Image: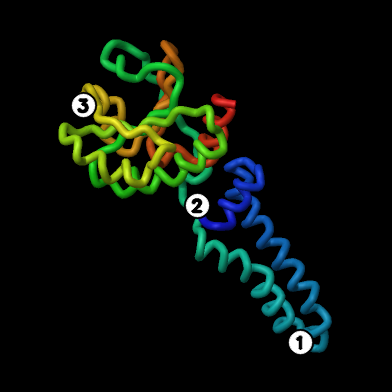
Amino acid sequence: MNSIERFLLDSGLSWTMSKLLPYILMVFIGLLLVFILKRFVAKMKLPVRLLIKLTVLILPFVLYFAVAPIYQGDFSNNSVEISKDDAYKELTGKRLVVLTIPGCPYCFEALGRMKKLKERVPAIEIDYIVCHTDPETMDWYKQEAGDAVNVKMAENIKSMSELAFGVFPTFVLVDGDKTLRTWSNDNFGVSAMDEIELNFN
């Protein structure tokens, strides 16, 4: 999440639009630059004019893409439904749970999104559950999470790791006794973030 996306989120746009809009704007900027350059290249030969116009048209998009590339899972929302049973009894109430392990850079990176989500939807409860036996492994997450995210140890490490299919972070939507919905990090894109917000608004 770059500063432009953060600004758009702060302006009230959805996660999907905040991700998509800058790329659309780059296309319009390219078109505007082509229009401005039109008279300056009018006397040039046709192949040269076309090359210049094409370069100017795609340059803003390419530059922004270089700074903020689109990854495969950025817009994804592919969840898996899991039947809730006693193995997952520590997952209670209505909340978003992030299953993590110590020292996981992707888990740590996801904290930025979770803090922004909490800022946008104050009513949401977000738990970081660390699948480990050493309480000190929580400190890394706690320092970054502040008061926005609850960081705790897994009560049943085996069950939580199995729920994550051994892939961390895994995001779990908990809604009372209903079926759990889980997303791997690659499947928890901006459209999934929008859906989570709708669940808590």
Quarter of the image for the C terminus: give it: top right
Residue drawn at x 40%, y 44% as measured from the top left: 110
The percent position of residue 50, horizontal first and vertical second, equals 72, 77
Residue 121, placed above or below residue 116: above
Rendered image: mark on residue 157: 3
Q: Is residue 184 left or right of residue 29?
A: left
Q: Nearer the viewer, residue 14 or 185?
A: 14
- Name the residue beneath numbered marker 1: 45
Q: Which residue is mark 2?
A: 1
The location of residue 13, given as percent across then percent down, is 65, 43
Q: Nearer the viewer, residue 162 or 115?
A: 115
Q: Nearer the viewer, mark 2 or mark 1?
A: 2
Residue 192, x across and y down, in percent: 51, 35
> As shown in the figure, which amino acid type bears the numbered disc 3?
Ile
Q: Marks 3 and 1: which is nearer the front?
A: 3
Residue at image coords 46%, 48%: 72
Say if 52 sits above or below 32 in the image.
below
Dividing the picture into quadrants, the one containing residue 156 is top left
- Name which residue type carries label 2: Met
Could you say where residue 46 lies in the image, as x and y percent from the top left? 76, 82
Secondary structure beneath dot 2 equals loop
Q: Decide which of 99, 82 is in the foreground and name it.
A: 99
Q: Residue at x 24, y 22 (%)?
A: 159
